Image (cartoon, rainbow, N blue to C red):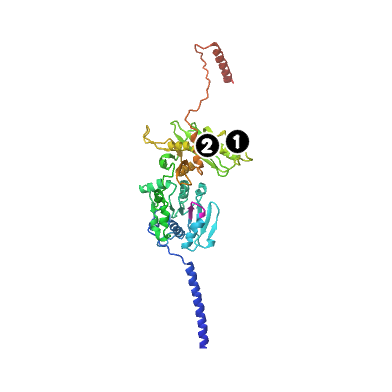
């Protein structure tokens, strides 16, 4: 009996031991590293500012920082101490520069540190690419910055996380969503500032001058994260970079103006008029940049009596030519239009029209818009550069009122034109990597249309008044007999109308 008991106990112990070994092996496989912030990440986590901007180098650990901030926000936890700070659930919006980054970068980074099950993820399609739902009810919605700005006007959130630079209108729209009462209402930007110059002029420069409250900015270089990078990465990566690129990609600085064509001339405080009031008697031109696949873009440029130019309105719609022409007429109704000019591609036989292969410009003319095609010189890159740069330059000498006003300014409503001016660069030679004296306008449809409008050389002229013949009832000396007859006839007709 004792031997049998010993044998049974041994079997049970061995089974228990085997089970424990399997559990240990499973835990070892699923064990995740413990997040310990580096000296660049720690100040960001410790900041209590409502808006935080992290200008980080490549390889500085910004994705890790962002993933841990997202998870802790979803659970109301302090990122460092893991103490409970806020009630849950919360609504979180994450804006990425490219939709693929969600599945390829952010979700894998979250899974590296935390348990994210497959059933928690749901594909949403564009523009809300994915949705992550936690057990406590918190929802993380991932949006792509490639979406239409109007998409960002509709949602509300408790937290906004931005991965990489995005156009200024999207930032404003995302920031507006932080309006839930009693919410933490926090925003965190993490990115390498290789573009979008507004991040420097509107955020970093003004913050460094103490103009913002509840905003804090950080620069994080790659050196804080070298221990987590592959051996030799820093030397291999930095060997091919210019000094200007090293400032951005290794030190967390800002884009270099070497490759930017207009950013060095642009000042939002000077060039943008938030509430432009336009006199409808002043002349304007409308320039159109049609496209067979993307939106057709129209820009209206006007001139005032002081010969200053203004980008007044913009219109971008993806539709066939006929309905676009009708929308264009309503959009331009009431303005004193001196010229309609359309990119010469609109003369080609393509599918821009409503039916068949009628050229875009012909369709506009049929609908009552007397548009003409751009001439060769109006599409010259050299002339376009000169027109834009000379228009944007801020004069050193003040005018009679002590103002330094450039010849070209833009209405605050023209967000597409503003973004194109801020981000357009020089074309780069693919072989040598050197910049060419041509604007890289391949995706800058608003800027192209603005250039066509400026090329018309619009000038101010007073509208012609219609002549009104007024015949006086009292005759005067020196009138020829034939003129007296005409006066009498007019007086007679006027008297007859008065009797009626």
Distance from label 2 to label 1 (Cα)? 15 Å
On residue 243, the disc is none
The percent coordinates of residue 450 (x first, y second) are 49, 38
Q: Nearer the viewer, residue 93 or 442?
A: 442
Magenta-colored span = 92-100
Q: Is residue 95 magenta?
A: yes
**Which residue is identified by label 2?**
287
Asked if residue 377 can be seen in this view, the reply is yes
Residue at 53 percent across and 11 percent down: it is 480
Residue at 51 percent across and 87 percent down: it is 3
The percent coordinates of residue 311 (x first, y second) are 47, 37
Q: Using the rendered view, name the quadrant where residue 65 is placed.
A: bottom left
Q: Residues within 10 Å of mark 1 (few under 14, many from 20)?
A: some
Q: Is residue 311 magenta?
A: no
**Which residue is identified by label 1?**
362
Asked if residue 141 can be seen in this view, the reply is no
User: Is residue 70 found left or right of 208 in the rendered image?
Assistant: right
Element under disc 2: strand
The percent coordinates of residue 173 (x first, y second) are 47, 48
Q: Nearer the viewer, residue 246 or 127?
A: 246
Q: Check the picture and name the quadrant holding the C terminus.
A: top right
How many marks do you count on the picture? Answer: 2
Q: Is residue 75 above or below residue 172?
A: below
Q: Is residue 100 above or below residue 303?
A: below
Whether the residues at callouts 2 and 1 have beta carbons within 8 Å, the answer is: no
Q: Which is more N-terminal, label 1 or label 2?
A: 2
Q: Residue furthest bottom?
A: 1
Q: Is residue 85 above or below residue 427?
A: below
Element under disc 1: helix
Q: Nearer the viewer, residue 177 or 384?
A: 384
Q: Using the rendered view, name the quadrant where residue 201 is placed.
A: top left
Q: Residues within 10 Å of mark 2 (few under 14, many from 20)?
A: many
């Amino acid at each position: 009996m004792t031997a049998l008991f010993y044998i049974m106990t041994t079997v049970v112990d061995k089974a228990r031991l085997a089970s424990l070994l399997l559990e240990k092996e499973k835990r070892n496989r699923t064990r995740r590293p413990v997040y310990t912030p580096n000296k660049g990440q720690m100040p960001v986590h410790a900041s209590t500012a409502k808006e935080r901007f992290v200008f980080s180098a490549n390889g500085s650990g910004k994705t890790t920082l962002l993933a841990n901030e997202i998870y802790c926000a979803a659970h109301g936890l302090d990122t460092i101490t893991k103490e409970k700070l806020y009630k849950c659930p919360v609504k979180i919006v994450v804006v990425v520069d490219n939709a693929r980054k969600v599945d390829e970068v952010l979700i894998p980074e979250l899974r590296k540190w935390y348990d994210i099950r497959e059933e928690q993820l749901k594909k949403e399609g564009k523009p809300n690419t994915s949705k992550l739902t936690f057990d406590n009810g918190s929802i993380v919605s991932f949006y792509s910055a490639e979406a239409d700005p109007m998409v960002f006007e509709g949602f509300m959130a408790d937290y906004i996380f931005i991965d990489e630079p995005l156009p200024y209108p999207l930032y404003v729209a995302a920031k507006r969503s932080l309006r839930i009462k009693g919410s933490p209402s926090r925003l965190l930007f993490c990115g390498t500032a290789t573009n979008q110059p507004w991040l420097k002029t509107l955020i970093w420069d003004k913050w460094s001058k103490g103009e913002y409250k509840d905003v804090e900015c950080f620069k994080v270089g790659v050196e804080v994260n070298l221990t987590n990078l592959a051996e030799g990465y820093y030397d291999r990566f930095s060997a091919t970079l210019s000094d200007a690129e090293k400032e951005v990609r290794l030190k967390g600085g800002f884009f270099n103006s070497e490759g930017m064509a207009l950013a060095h001339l642009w000042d939002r405080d000077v060039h943008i008029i938030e509430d432009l009031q336009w006199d409808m008697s002043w002349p304007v031109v409308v320039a159109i940049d049609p496209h067979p696949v993307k939106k057709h873009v129209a820009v209206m440029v006007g001139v005032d009596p002081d010969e200053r130019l203004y980008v007044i309105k913009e219109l971008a719609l993806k539709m066939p030519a006929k309905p676009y022409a009708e929308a264009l007429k309503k959009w331009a109704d009431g303005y004193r239009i001196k010229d309609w000019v359309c990119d010469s591609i609109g003369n080609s036989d393509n599918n821009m029209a409503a039916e068949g292969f009628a050229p875009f410009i012909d369709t506009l003319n049929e609908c009552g818009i007397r548009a003409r095609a751009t001439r060769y010189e109006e599409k010259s890159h050299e002339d376009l550069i000169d027109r834009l740069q000379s228009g944007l330059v801020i004069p050193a000498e003040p005018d009679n009122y002590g103002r330094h006003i450039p010849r070209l300014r833009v209405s605050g409503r023209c967000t597409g034109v503003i973004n194109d001016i801020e981000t357009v660069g020089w074309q780069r030679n693919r072989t040598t990597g050197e910049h060419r004296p041509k604007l890289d306008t391949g995706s800058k449809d608003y800027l192209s249309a603005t250039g066509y409008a400026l090329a018309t050389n619009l000038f101010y002229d007073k509208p012609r008044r219609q002549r009104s013949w007024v015949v006086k009832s009292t005759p005067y000396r020196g009138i020829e007999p034939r003129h007296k007859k005409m006066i009498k006839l007019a007086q007679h007709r006027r008297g007859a109308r008065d009797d009626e």
